[in-house]
Image (cartoon, rainbow, N blue to C red):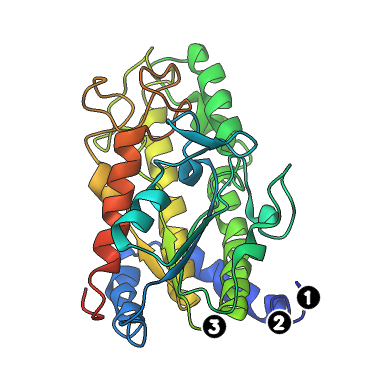
Amino acid sequence: MNHHSREDGTVPRRRRAVALGAALSSCALVAGFAPAASATAERGHAHHRKDYVALGDSYTSGPLIPRQVDANCARSDHNYPSIVAADRDTATFTDVSCGGATTDEMWKAQGTNGPQLDAVQRDTDLVTLQIGGNDIGFSSIISTCAGLSSKDLPGNPCQQYYGSTGVDQLTLRIIETAPKVSRVLRAVHARAPHARVVVVGYPDLLPDDGSGCYPSVPFATKDFPYLRDTGKRLNLMLRTVALLNRAEYVDTYGPTVGHDMCKAPADRWIEPLRPASPAAPAHPNAKGQEAMAGAVLKRLGGNDGHH
């Protein structure tokens, strides 16, 4: 397939607009527009079973959650796309999510996993996309902040590290990732013009109230709210880019508040750096995948176009 003709041509024109949109600080502005895209999205799709394709990274694939069905991508058959597909009784279901994926892997093979966009076909009806965390360096951020915590446990050494140039580098990475996610969404639309396209945000990893839980999660006290806010900025960018690219957005942060990695094992849906339930460190466990599936299904609503 030609991966470039229709998908890349608008990058220069749109780049500034998307970057500007990603920098928006007003959740109210974005939230005010977000539902409008969905009102007509499901019409015309009402009377047949859907062909569903799931794209994404490890938050989608579900590493270590039983049953693992793809070792290369650490993919579980109990991840949220599998739950959504079963609930919706899809005609076909193709899950190409893969641990470690960035937006680049939409076009590039990742081990035995082909370019994820290759799964999106002209007759695809529904696409979910959860991507961006690895583009901003999710794993390295966690290891960096954990490593710096001992320098100033009551303080915010990680925030100081990423802000040492006078510009917060994580905020900058989020803004720089916006046009990459936008490009993926344009490619999805080009390949599946009639598909309903849903961007799935990331869940709540750390206490929403800004509290911490050292040493279970080894960050300095004031870095907990900093990293919480970074996660919220990433989700705001994804919400904004979805709005600008005729896609819907699913908030998984709100439904997972109170079940972050600092909570007791029975209550948490995100595992800490030393998991007690089968999941990768700092990733959703089976309950977390169920919660994300619930958020996606709520957004999809019935087959009558009413949400």
The residue identified by callout 2 is 6
The mark closer to the camera, 2 or 3, is 3
How packed mark 3 is, by other alpha carbons closer than 10 Å (few <14, some 14-19, many 20 or more), is: some
Question: Which label belongs to residue 2?
Answer: 1
Q: Measured along the vertical axis of the image, is residue 111 above or below residue 9? A: above
Q: Which amino acid type is marked by label 2?
A: Arg
Q: Measured along the vertical axis of the image, is residue 13 above or below residue 163? A: below
Residue at 61% x, 39% y: name it: 73
Q: CA distance from mark 2 to mark 1?
A: 8 Å
Q: CA distance from mark 2 to mark 3?
A: 12 Å
- Work out whether residue 253 or residue 17 is closer to the camera in this orientation and state it: 253
- Work out whether residue 87 or residue 98 is closer to the camera in this orientation and state it: 87
Q: CA distance from mark 3 to mark 1?
A: 16 Å
Is residue 163 among what the camera can see?
A: no
Question: Which label belongs to residue 193?
Answer: 3
Q: Residue 297 occupies which quadrant of the picture?
A: bottom left
Q: Which amino acid type is marked by label 3?
A: Pro
